[in-house]
Image (cartoon, grey):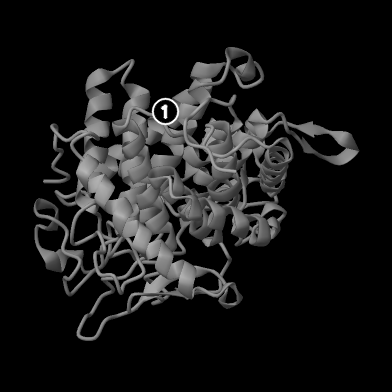
Amino acid sequence: MALKIDTQVTPQKLLPALTRLFDVSTQKMHSLQKTWDPVQGTPVFTSQGKYTARGWTEWTQGFLFGSALLQYDATGEPSFLEWGRAHTMKHMAGHVSHTGVHDHAFNNISTYGNLLRLMKEGKLAQSEPEQAFYELALKVSGAVQAARWTGLPDGLGYIYSFNGPHSLFIDTLRSLRSLGVAHLLGHVLMGERDARISLLERLVAHAKTTAQFAVYYGEGRDIYDLRGRTAHESVFNINDGSYRCPSSQQGYSPFTTWTRGLAWAICGFAEQLEFLDRLPAAEFATLGGRRKTCEPFLKAATATADFFLENSPVCGVPYWDTGAPHLHRLGNYLDRPADPFNAWEPVDSSAAAIAAQGLIRLGTVLAPTNASQGSRYRQAGLTVAQTLLNEPYLSLNARHQGLLLHSVYHRPNGWDHLAKGQKVPNGESSMWGDYHLRELALLLLRQSRGESWLTFFRCAQAPRSASRKIS
């Protein structure tokens, strides 16, 4: 068996649960605002219910301040906007010009992007200097991210990971948002001898490279070639641009599927299909046309989505890796809801939150041309959302600072807290899991209210009027 899709659930039916989530989230945000000292670094994941830092890269700071902005969008409470905006101004500039990471969108679209979107939607008072400031930050972020580039033969290439120029991470698909927004804002990357480098072309090249090398299609690539599975890392020989092998930093092995990486692929490809679908035909003149550009992304999106559906328990919350070494000890684990408290392998609710949004977006993209397939993915995403909006995943304990329980960070490194008497991590939260649950919930809440569809590129679109404004 696998994910059991609820064909009857709708955003409107989820409205009470969505309202409760943002009520609970209000308390969680207030707790973090009162207790977190920025001197400690960035909150990454909880230990015994309290957020802690983990020095690797500061990739979650934007999720903290961005969560406040999502909370404002959902509730209209001005204090969340004020806090998110003030801390973005104070702490996020370094992320805009950060040349050493592959995850600009996590930090900068979550903060500057959300602020600009709120202004464009009329939920933040119009200010030309403030708008120009947000736009400049997003333009620079997109260009800096695109400059972290390894070129490959045949027009391919990728934004390389913090491991170095040989390394392509699947996570970076969601950082392509930085390039997309900067492109829509009219920006380019300036290279040697004033060469104007298209951010759209780099976005497409990175996504094509990821689709070709980081996603499997059951076409005999190796003996572990299962359609839809993903590799966390793809390794290249930078001397000649040849592909060498898959690898993994956070999964069990290069030949198994780390489910958060799988979720990044589902969400990343679906978002890029949404983005490309809104561009005018002229934008594809140098890319071979819209259809040729989008075909590999649709192939990758549907393959990874199907793999997620086939390899998740009936509730839609996956275990942390589909090849984790002790899964066999759980018996027919796909035939029943995931068990966060089992003695052998942890689940990863953050992967579920990311994948759910991707499934909903993919279903929406497909609906006009393939109604049945679109409905299947959309209802699958809503089914996963329904699971996460309730216990045991929604954190109702006021003393726990996390919102989404049973998230894991780095299983191979053993970074996750082990509760007394437990053999595997459970009961803890992560900043990216909490952010993505809020983002998923806001997407559905806005739809249930009849508001505009939430996309990362709304911040680069023309302003629209709205009733709620704050100065």
Image: 461 above or below 429: above
Callout 1 amino acid: Ser
Q: From where the camera sits, is residue 459 visible?
A: yes
Whole-percent x, y for residue 173 in the image:
51, 44
Whole-percent x, y for residue 393 in the image:
23, 60
Considering the image in quadrants, where does the C terminus appear? top right
Q: Is mark 1 on a helix, strand or loop?
A: loop
Of 63 and 375, nearer the camera is 63
Whole-percent x, y for residue 46 in the image:
38, 73
Within the image, what quadrant is residue 453 found in? top left
Of 152 and 311, nearer the camera is 311
Residue at the spot 58% in from the left edge and 15% down from the top edge: 280
Residue at the spot 19% in from the left edge and 62% down from the top edge: 392
Whole-percent x, y for residue 451 in the image:
38, 29
Image: 86 above or below 125: below
Left/right of residue 327 with respect to residue 307 in the rendered view: left
Q: From where the camera sits, is residue 215 visible?
A: no
Image: 315 above or below 293: below
